[in-house]
Amino acid sequence: EILVSNGAKQAVYQAVLAVCRPGDEVIIPAPYWPSYPEMVRLAGATPVIVKTSVDQDYRLTPEDLEAAMSDKTRMLILCNPSNPTGAVLEKHHLLGLAKVLAGKAPKAFVLADEIYERLVYDDVEHTAFAALTVEDDDGQSVAMWPRTLTVNGFSKAYAMTGYRLGYLAAPRQLVQACSTLQSQISSCASSLAQEAGIAALQEVPEDELEGLYAQMREKRDLVLSRLQSIPGVRCPTPTGAFYVLPDVSSYFGRTSPGGAILSDSTALCVALLQETAVALVTGDAFGAP
């Protein structure tokens, strides 16, 4: 029920390929990691983008999920904690989503990208979607494990970016389908990277990891305090991952000190880079123009 892959990205793509077919729909909350919609399209399926807003701290609600569903819904992709917002769907949020799935889409799968699960702050606890059980509309208990493909890896929690070591956890038949794909794509993850992963799991002291996460917290607090002090910038406090996604839409239509028209987030990012040498990633890439 575990498949080790060449990075979590490979595990995500293989999960999409194994489950989705042409004509299927895959629900993706926005802002999203840019690869999700493209992977869905490569599988021949259709991404259904559900916008979330700064007012809801970029969290998908059960109501928005239900409104996006159809008889073609095959998968929901959840990145929790989120890239690029840092938002965390806590247990009560996840239970609401799970109940909608159990009642309205009993045959749909969930791809739970939990690569940032160790990076949570402010006493927030991460909950694995696969561990949830809810009641459907008939009052029957429905476990999420049989329909969940959980993706994780080592790059974020253990600062092992570049080792390309991820994994998929799912029911046996789903793992077997992904394994069949992987055997024809890359065979296996590097044995050297796997040995490094074993060392990370068994030999890295927990207090050393906590020190790393504390540094992340300090950096978040610094960046957040600076962003929130800028007039017109709205930025929810990210409680996970290592990203912030400020809403700068109040500046759209203005002119920069250098004379650039700030028509959208791309124009604003270009102006900041050219005029102040500050590099930001435009929201367009994440479905948040």
Image (spheres, rainbow, N blue to C red):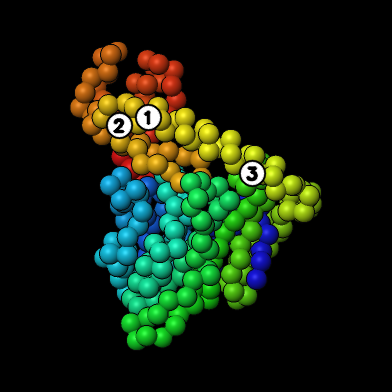
Chain-order first, disc 1 or disc 2:
1
Look at the picture and state if 178 lies above or below 275.
Answer: below
Distance (Cα) linking label 1 and label 2: 7 Å
Earlier sequence position, callout 1 versus callout 3: 3
Quadrant placement of the C terminus: top left
Q: Is residue 108 left or right of residue 154?
A: left
In the visual, does 204 lie left or right of 86?
A: right
In the depicted view, which residue is nearer to us: 45 or 102? Answer: 102
The residue tagged 2 is: 233
The quarter of the image holding the N terminus is: bottom right
- What residue did someone put label 1 on? 227
Could you say whether the residue bearing mark 3 is in a helix, strand or loop?
Answer: helix
Q: Residue at x 52, y 69 (%)?
A: 130
Q: Residue furthest left?
A: 253
Q: Amino acid at mark 2?
A: Val
Which tag is nearer the camera, tag 2 or tag 3? 3
Percent across and percent down for residue 174 are 58, 72
Residue displayed at 40% across by 64% down: 92
